[in-house]
Image (cartoon, helix red, strand yellow):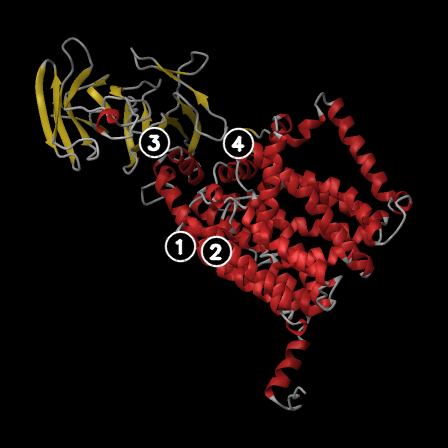
Amino acid sequence: RRRRSPAGSPRSSLGRALRRVPAWAWLAAIVVGSAVLRIVLGRGIVAPFIMVDEVIWSEVARGLADAGEPLLRDQPDPGYSIVYPLLISPVYALFESLPDAYAGVKALNAVVMSLAAIPAYFLARRVMRNGLALLAALLAVALPSLAYTGTVMTENVFYPLFLVTVLALVLVLENPSAERVVLLFALLALAFATRVQAVALFPAVFLAPLLLAVFERRALKSLVSRFRWLYGIALGLGLAAVIVQLVAGLSPQELLGAYSPVDEAGYQLGEALRYLWWHVAELSLYVLVIPLAATVVLVGRARSLDSRLQAFLAALVSITVCLIPVVAVFASRFSYRIEERNLFYVAPLFCVALLAWVEIGSPRPRVLASSAAVVSALLLVVIPFDRFLTTSAITDTLMLLPLWSVQDRIGESWITLAALGLAAGLAAAFLFVPRRFAIALPLLVLGLWVLAVRPIWWGTHGFERFSRGALFQGIRTAERDWVDRTLPRDERAAFLWTGRTDRLTVNETEFFNRGVGPVYYVTDPTPGGLPETRVRIDPGTGRVTLPDGAAVRDRFLLADSSFEPDGTALASDKGWGVTLWRVNSPLVSAVRVDGLYPNDTWSGKTVTYLRRRCVRGRLTVSLSSDPSLFLAPQTVIARSNGAVVGRVQFEPEGRAVLSVPVSPVLGTSDCRVVYTVVPTAVPADVIRGNTDPRELGAHFNRFVYKPGP
C-alpha cells in the first residue's frame, strides 16, 4: 500500500499549491519559456543558410516595409506566399540596420512559433485531462523543428497556424455548424496564403468526415445531410475561385503562384512511391516510434472510443494521409531529399494521440499493439542513410542530424544497426512499460527530443556551424552590413556576379545590406531563379551592356577582383576580394584577364593582364600552387612592353606575391602584362585516377593595381 504524505508535509503543500496554479498560467509559462530559450539559441545563428528561401522572404518583407508592396529585388513578387512577409515586415520598418532587423526577426519567430503550445493544448484538452494537455503543449514546443526559429522561413508562422486549423477541423467534425465551417475555411485560406503546401489540407477536410463515419459506424449516406455546410461552402468557394481565375484570363493552376510549375512537372510513379515510403519511415523516426505505435492502436480500436477522440483521430489520419503524399511526390521531382521540414507539423498530433492513449489506460491488444510497435520500429531500417545523411539534411531533415553525429563516431556501416537498436528499444518500451508508469513514454519522447538539441544546434552538422560557414562563404569582413556603412545615404550599388566567387557572396551581401540593388551576371545566373540581368562585356572595349544594347549606368558597383571597373574603390571585403566601386559612367571593364580557366583561378601556361585607361603604377598578383600536382618549385615570369619586369619562384605548398611596374603601351592608354608559368602539368597525366585533361600552371588568386610612381 502507498503511504500518503501527512496532511501538513511540504510535499503535500507543494502538490496542492501546484494544482491551484490555473492552466492559463502554466500555458503562459510554457510559451514564454520556449520563446526565451529560442531567442537565446537564435543568437548563435549568424547568417541565413537556407538558400534562396531566406533571401526571398526577407526581400518580400522589405518590399512591404519600404514600398508597401511585395517586391523581390525591386521587381514585382511572382506570387510567393504573403502572410509571413507581412508578419515580419514591421521589423524591417523598425530597424534601419539589416543585421539588427535579422536579430529582431529571429526573436519574433521564437515568440510566434512558441504560440503553437496554445492550439496544441486546446486540441489535447478535448480528449484528456488538464495535466496531460499541458504536457501536450510542452511537447509541441519541444519539437526539434523549432530550430527553424533561427531562420527567416515560413515554418515559423505556418506551424502554429496549422495546429489552429486542425483544431477548427476537429470542432467541425464534432459539430458541423455554419459558423464553425466558415471559421475552418477562413483558416484554410490563411494557411494557403502562408504556405502553398496547405493545399493538401483541402482534400483532408473532405476525407475526415468519411473516416469519422467509419469510426462511428454511421451510414455514409448520412454524411451529406450532417456535413451539408461543409460540403456546400467548399463547393461554392471552389467554383468561385475557378470562375475568378477564368474571368481574369488565368488558369486555376496559377492559384499556386510562384509554385505553379510544380503542377506541370513530370513525375515518375516508382520514384514517387519510394519517396512516399521514405517519408513515412522518417516520420516514425521523427516522433520516435512510440507516438506512431500508440496512434495505430487507437485507430485500430477507434469504434470503441468516445466521440471526441474519434473526431480527433479522423482529423489526424486524414491530414497525415493527404499531406505525406504531396510532400513525397514533390521531393521525388524537385529536391531529392526527405522533406521533414514540410511534414513535422503533424508530429504534435501524434503526441496528443499518445497522451490520449495514456489517458484511456494504455490499452495494448496483443496482436494490434505488437504489430504497431514492430512495424513502427522496422520503418527506421527502410531509410537509406547513406543517401540522405548529407548536407541537405541540415536544412530539411533535422532528426537525421543526431544519427549523422552517431555515424561520425561508429562509422557508416554501423548506422543502420544503431537506428534499429534505437527503434527496438522504443518499441519495447511501448509494449512492456507497466500501465501505471505509461506516462513515462511521452516523457521519454520529450527527453530524447531535448537530447537531439545538441547535434541539431551545436553539432558538427548543426545549425550554428552551418550558418557560420554560410557567412564565411559570403562575407568575410567584420561588419555584415559593410556596404551600407560605406555607401552615401539613399544610394544603391549593383552587384556584378562573374561566377568566380561563391554565389553566397551575392546572397549574404544583399541579405544584410539595403544598398545592394540589381544583380547582373556575365555567364550564368546565381542558383535560385531570382530576378537577375545578363550583361555583355565587349572584349575589345570593355564596355558593359544590357541585353538591349544599352550601357549599364549604375553609379556604384560591387564586383569580385576578376572584374575591375573604371572607377574608385570605396571599400572591400578582402577575404573574397569583393569591392565596392564608385563607377565612372557608363560602366566599362578596366581589366581583362586571359589565360584563366572559366570560373576558376587555375591558369594555363600563359596569363595576360590588360588594363584600360591605365596610368603608370604597380600591379601585384598573389599566387599559389598545388603540392598534389607539382613536386618541384615553379617560376612565374612577368613581361611588359617587351621586357621582363619581374619573376618569382615558390614551392608547391607555398604562396607568393609578384609585384611589377606597369605603364601604358606606347600610343595607347592600355597597360599589358604577360605572365608565363614554368613548369605546367596535366592532372590526368600526373595523378592516378584523375581525369582532368587541362594543362595547369598556377593559381592567380588576386590582382591589385595601384597607380603612382
Helix, strand or loop at mark 3: loop
Q: CA distance from mark 2 to mark 1?
A: 9 Å
Q: Earlier in the sequence, mark 4 or mark 2?
A: 4
The C terminus lies in quadrant? top left
**Eyeballing the image, is 478 above or below 626?**
below
Q: Are discs 1 and 3 less than 8 Å apart at CB?
A: no
In the visual, does 76 lie left or right of 669? right
**Pointer 4 or 3: first along the chain:** 4
In this rendering, the answer to whether 225 lies above or below 367 is above
Query: How far is disc 4 from disc 3 in space, using C-alphas?
Result: 23 Å
Instruction: Give the quarter of the figure containing the N terminus.
Output: bottom right
Amino acid type at circle 2 is Ala
From mark 1 to mark 3, how far is it between C-alphas?
36 Å
Per the rendering, the mark at residue 501 is 3
Residue 410 bears which disc, if any? Answer: 1
**Quadrant of the rendered image containing residue 549:** top left
Q: In this view of the protein, which residue sits in the foreground, 527 or 409? A: 409
Residue occupying the point 67% across, 90% down: 7
Q: Earlier in the sequence, mark 1 or mark 3?
A: 1
Q: Quadrant of residue 424?
A: bottom right
Q: Nearer the viewer, residue 532 or 588?
A: 532
Position of residue 125 measured from the top left corner of the image (x, y, whole percent)? 73, 63
Image quarter of residue 201: top right
Q: Position of residue 223 (x, y in %)?
A: 88, 45
The residue that mark 4 highlights is 72
Which mark's residue is nearer the viewer, 4 or 2? 2
Residue where numbered disc 2 is placed: 418
The amino acid type of the residue labelled 4 equals Leu
How far across and how far down the image is residue 237, in percent? 79, 35
